[in-house]
Image: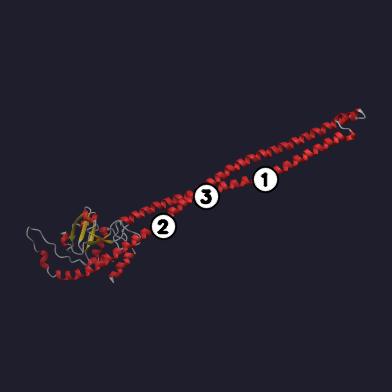
Amino acid sequence: MLVLAIAAACVAAGTATGDPTVGAKQAQAQQVMAQIQQLDSSLERARNLYVSASEKLQRIEHSLAINRIALRAARANLHKSQGALMQRLVVIYTSRDDQSTLAVLLGATSIDDLVNRIETVQSVSQQDVAVMKEVIGFKHAVTTHRRALKLAHRSQAHLVAQRAAAKSRISSQLSRQQRLLSSIKGEIAQLLAAQHARQLALARAAQSRYTELSQEQALALQQTAVGASAIAGGASVAPPSQYGGVVGIAMRYLGTPYVWGGSGPGGFDCSGLVAYVYSQVGVSLPHYTGAQWNVGVPVSRSDLQPGDLVFFDGLGHVGIYVGGGQFIHAPHSGDVVKISSLGESWYSSTYVGARRVTG
């Protein structure tokens, strides 16, 4: 039953982990996610710039289409104006079968007729010239505007191409980062699965040892004189631990998240886990690592038994020995209650000592 509870606790550990490799991968994932967020923002800006440039290009192309229509109209009007002027001149100079303006003027029958003829010639001439100038000016303006539109079109088309390239480049970068993030998440999942498998194996081994040692302790508790006798040199041997049962209790909480100041059962810090587990067997321990160091009697590393308290890092950390060189503890923020080895480099190098709870 206990093994099943341990397995469930290990699976419930989720993504919380103190494994350095997993931690490094999670940090890398956070960096990639930040880059993805930045690229997302950049891509949105690039899209907006591209759309804006494309819309302006469309307006220029629309203006060019209108300009082409206006230019065709201007050319047609100029052609008509030129034709009308030529016809008028022909009419003027061919009236009364005369072939010149002088003939038109000399053909007057009176002074009034002469004045009228002169005014008519001048009026027609001035009006037609004005119309011609207006038509020519309009055609010139349309042509000039067309050249400007063509230049603007080339410039805007170039800008649109640049915007499209920038959008494509950022989109490509974003795709790469998303693939990288997916790959990192896959690696994290594999590492976590391996870590959970290791924890499950450790828990099963600890449970097996706990069962065997419980039987041994039952016999050892009968030999009360062993722990009370003194050895040569004045040193004392700690009595056998009577609290090996706390190991089984502690293992029920494998996978429980570390919570600073947590005293359980939903979250623990290191001393909170020790205090809570011992409270389940009727022993009240202070919720402070330094104070727990003053509990019970010292015990050498070679004499460690399940239930002994092991201390590290200048009394900054504590765990419960489970046998086989391993202990159960709540490591630090972001981690969970787990089993670790005294032989691991950090724990081995920062090991302070152990205490056995005796009452």
**Where is mark 2, residue-wise?**
182
Q: Which residue position holds label 1? A: 66
Residue at 44% across, 53% down: 176
- Is residue 253 at least partly visible in the picture? no
Amino acid carrying mark 3 in the image: Arg
Per the model, the C-alpha gap separating discs 1 and 2 is 52 Å
Among the 4 quarters of the image, the one containing residue 188: bottom left
The C terminus - image quarter: bottom left
For the residue carrying disc 3, how many other residues have a C-alpha within 10 Å: few (<14), some (14-19), or many (20+)? some
**Residue 123: % across, % down:** 82, 33
1 or 2: tag closer to the N-terminus = 1
| Amino acid type assigned to the residue bearing label 1 in the image | Ile
Mark 2 falls on what kind of element? helix
- Does 64 appear above or below 231? above
Q: Earlier in the sequence, mark 2 or mark 3?
A: 3
Under circle 3, the secondary element is helix
Q: CA distance from mark 2 to mark 3?
A: 25 Å
Kindly tell me whether residue 176 is visible in this rendering. yes
Q: For mark 3, what is the residue?
A: 47
Residue visible at 43% across and 55% down?
A: 178
160 and 345: which is toward the camera: 160
> Picture quarter containing residue 287?
bottom left
134 horizontally vs 15: left or right: right
**In the image, 232: left or right of 286?**
left
Q: How many other residues sit within 10 Å of disc 1, few (<14), some (14-19) or many (≥20)?
A: few
The residue positioned farthest toward the left in the image shown: 232
Q: Mark 2: few, some, or many residues within 10 Å (few <14, many ≥20)?
A: few
23 vs 295, nearest the viewer: 23
Q: Earlier in the sequence, mark 1 or mark 3?
A: 3
In the image, which is nearer the foreground, mark 1 or mark 3?
1
